[in-house]
Amino acid sequence: MKYRHSKKRAKRLLVLGLCLLLFVGVFIFRQTKFFKKPVEKSFGIKCEVVKKFDFSNDDSIKEWEEKVFKNKVSYKIEKEGGESYVKASSDKSASALYYKIKIDAKNARPVVTWKWRVDKFPAKTRAESLEIENEDDFAARVYVIFPAMFITNSKVLEYVWSETLPAGTVGTSPYSGNIKLMVLTQGVSKNNGWVSEERDIYSDYVKLFGKPPEYNVGAIAFMTNTEHTGTSAEAAYDDIVIGYKEEIGANEGRGADK
């Protein structure tokens, strides 16, 4: 009897040992690249992708929510040359599409990439400005939003395609000091084609706000608007990717762009 009990006990210990080894093995395996989020090279930036929008089908735009400021902009999926994208058409209107997503901006290095195209700029009678409410219309804008518990403390990075302002122009929104703008592209693109953008969110935040992010990213958005000029504009958006920058060099720590 003692022999049988000892044998059963040995079997139980063996099973427990195998289970433990299996658990440890699975844990280690999950830490390898096979279980990590995919690392893609998106327009030159290597990033661990958290979310990618390629707008490959008619339903892909439905996961975005809309915020209407004045009348609805037409956002719809169009296909051209085997590729699909979001076509935005604004007629005396302003509404944005936004997607809620939590991205660590305080302890990581978030990045966002996308491509866009402007087909028609809003007609303006005054010189373009990032900081004047009058005629504050742009054919294409992309936002990175840092929501706070108190909405008045929230911060926003706004990237703009301008008809006349040079790329690199920065400013503060006429609506709030917590919204900082940066012009990325100027004028009509060559052959009316797509322009690819890649932004280091942390670096841009430090450059425009003068300090590291206080809050994490809570949403991204894009908008084409013409409510101030009462005219119309058309743009296209595609391949929006948000994630974390990979392989930060030894001399590329936080605050490098201060």
Image (spheres, rainbow, N blue to C red):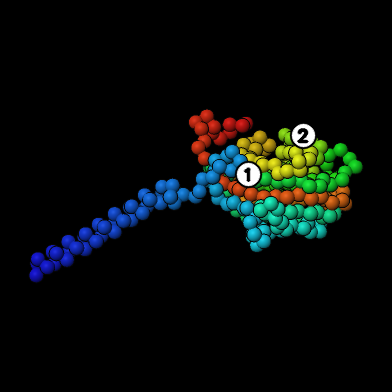
Element class at badge 1 = strand
Query: Which label was assigned to residue 113?
Result: 1
Q: Which of 242 and 5 is in front in this view?
A: 242
Residue found 17% across the figure and 66% down from its top: 8
Q: Residue 38: percent from the left, percent from the top?
A: 50, 48
Can residue 148 be spotted in the picture?
no
Q: How far apart are marks 2 and 1 (CA)?
A: 20 Å
Residue found 17% across the figure and 64% down from its top: 9
Check the image and name the residue furthest to the bottom.
Answer: 1
Q: Which of 240 and 221 is in front in this view?
A: 240
Q: Residue 239: percent from the left, percent from the top?
A: 64, 49
Element class at badge 2 = loop
48 horizontally vs 8: left or right: right
Query: Which label was assigned to residue 99?
Result: none
Q: Residue 197: percent from the left, percent from the top?
A: 66, 41
72 horizontally vs 220: left or right: right
Instruction: Identify which amino acid the numbered label 1 is placed on.
Output: Thr
Q: Earlier in the sequence, mark 2 or mark 1?
A: 1
Residue found 21% across the figure and 63% down from its top: 12
Instruction: Identify which amino acid the numbered label 2 is placed on.
Output: Pro
Residue tagged 2:
166
Q: Can you say whether 103 is above or below 202 in the image?
A: below
Check the image and name the residue furthest to the right.
Answer: 125
Name the quarter where the C terminus is drawn: top right
Can residue 108 be spotted in the picture?
yes
The 10 Å Cα crowd at callout 2, few under 14, some 14 to 19, many 20 or more, is some
Name the quarter where the N terminus is drawn: bottom left
